[in-house]
Amino acid sequence: MITVAGATFLLTTAQTSYAFAVDPAGYLRHLHWGGRIDRVGDFEAPARWDLSTNDMLADITPQEYPVHGRFRYAEQCLALRFADGMRELRVEVTGHRVDDDELVVSLADAQRAIAIDLHYLVHEQWDLIERWAVVRNDGAEPVVLESVFSAQFRVPYEDLTFRNVQGMWAAEQHAFTQPVSYGKIVIEARRGISTHHHNPYVVLGRHATETTGEVWFGVLRHSGNFKGIVEQSQYGGTSFQLGVNDYDFELRLPPGGQFATPAVVAGYSGAGLGAMSHRLHAFGRSLMAPGIRDVLYNSWEATGFDVTADNQITLARRAKDMGVELFVVDDGWFGRRGQDSDGLGDWWVNRDKFPDGLAPMIEAVRDLGLRFGIWVEPEMVNPNADLYRDHPNWIHREPDREPDLARQQFVLDLSRPDVQDFVVGTLDQLLSEYDIDYVKWDANRPMSQVGADRDVWVRHVDALYDVVRRIKAKHPGVLIEACASGGGRVDLGALTVFDDFWPSDNTDARDRLDIQRGYSYVYPAKAMRAWVTDSPNFLTQRAVPLRFRFHVAMMGTLGIGADLTKLSDDELGQAAKLVAKYCEIRATVQDGDFHRLDDPSANDYRLLEYSAPDQAVVFAFLPASLLGRRGTQVRLRGLDPDATYRFYAEWRHQERSGRYLMAHGFPLWLQGDYASDVIVFDRVTA
Ligand code: GLA
């Protein structure tokens, strides 16, 4: 709900409120972000004065969208340059409008024709708000934006805890926390993708655990260079900005031109990190195509670049026997692609590998009753490809310099309309010619050497979203997975146009426990592809039992990536049973609430739960037994306290009330390394 009283604005969701007002000095002053307060009359923004000749109002006032100029020294949201070199902004609120769930507050510079619209979208049902800004040049001369963030947020406390993830290729999404103190914490991406290194969000906690304490969070809907700045103020409180990175950035606004920042989805939880995740997961799922996701098979780890019609059909037959529903052929099917140095960009079928085209293979897969998917990497090109020979100027490059290769490839400059049309045309042709349900869209290197146009970082990402939307408009039923050497493009911007994520090239089940945990803070299980692959794992050389590998992968949308020709009949049988088990619980896993239950101090148990109205599922892992025979007590969350649940534990079926299972729990005991179990709690209907 949006309430406006005079110059005070109050946004309320089911459990939270967000308030700000125009104060006597003309600043749009932030007033409240926290628990729900319904009475707008409780809020006021009394006059304040400079604290000293060195501590001025512009710095002291917590503003909704601070701009560069005057005595503003703290971080700001907007800095720009007018054509005559003038750089100071003096904005005031000029009006507002409310349109259903959206509030737009307009600011403008009285002397210079710059207008800023601050957008606030209230997602009442998810306890979230969404903020972005639109900067418009109403003048007759161009203006250059030097820095333009989506929003500033403020928490009225100090000594908070900052959370994000850190990592690298094949080790993404490792959650970390660090204290917020004086000075700043900066988190960013500079590679044109949201990267494997950090993720575009800020989470601030105050005494926060999974179920208690306060959490304030903002998640950016952008897949490119981002920056989050957390600043604890000497004047009390902590602010953060989130938005497009101002690193190597400039954006020219012609007369009449405007720039809309990506949005930040933000919220407050008074009940710890779990409630934050539930809200963000529900929001994330709302962006996705509805329906339960298929069990997938992907041939990458089995056949690498050596795909042929025969070896794919052999794999598809075995996959079908295991209960797989969607068969995906990965890299290697196109151009003169025998290795990573060749053929990228030449999206015609490799006739050495598929003499009769893809059709016979796709028909064979379909005859098995499977859906079919295929890998592409449309933003890239190898120098050894016809596409590059024909269009050497289509890549990001600095004039007069040899561009650098990574994985033997260059990045196409997707901000060019001819490149966009090429990508849309290529995918349109592929999807029109063949019966394809699923596309894995990869991007295996970062952008670099982008040349003189410093807005290209943003324009590449906008163009990416645009081409994916154009392809989907022509082929609405096709689901598209976002992959960037694994998890380089896991972000809410990507989830807005793509359908799910490949979170990591690391498919080692033990490593995945941590990767998937980090991922789970913000992103929904339904968007997380997870495969069971061979043991020992190709990357870590770690041997892990099949059951444990399955149980880990069953916590997302299950996929199989093992070389099925190497599995024994016994293993295939075991795998088929585990796929069937997944199908029984996948509605709960994909659409339920996710709970991080564990207290790993008790013998390294990893305990995770999904709860839905009729079922809850507990996943229990003991990667390494550290304390002999020590078991643990598992208390569930998210059950109906008055309902009865039936489950199998301690070698017998049991029935208990939801209240009992949440307040007391049940004893769990796993034995040995890589022990795991999945315990299903079915609601008993009267
Ligand atoms: C990337 C992806 C992998 C696989 C290969 C193919 O590394 O992350 O899953 O598709 O490319 O070359």
Image (tube, rainbow, N blue to C red):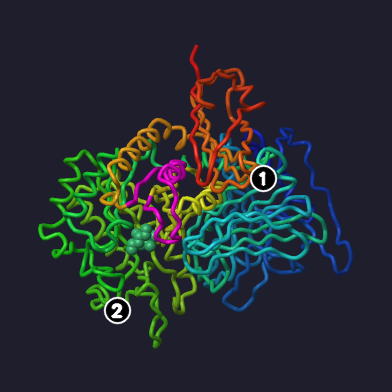
Say what secondary structure mark 1 lies in: loop
Which residue occupies the extreme left position in the image? 356
Q: Secondary structure at mark 2?
A: helix
Q: In the image, 644: left or right of 459?
A: right
Q: Which residue corresponds to the image point at 25% horizontal and 51% vertical from the top-left?
A: 565
Image: 175 above or below 608: below
At a point 47% along the width and 53% down the height, the residue shown is 493
Amino acid type at circle 1 is Ser
- Identify the residue under disc 2: 392
- Magenta span: predominant SS is loop
Q: In the picture provided, is 47 more to the left or to the right than 369?
A: right
Q: Which residue is mark 1?
A: 601
Image quadrant of ligand 1 equals bottom left
Residue 529 at x, y percent in the picture:
41, 48
Specify the label residue 465 is tagged with.
Answer: none
Tell me the CA gap for discs 2 and 1. 56 Å
- Magenta residues span 533-562
Q: Which is nearer the eye, 52 or 629?
A: 629
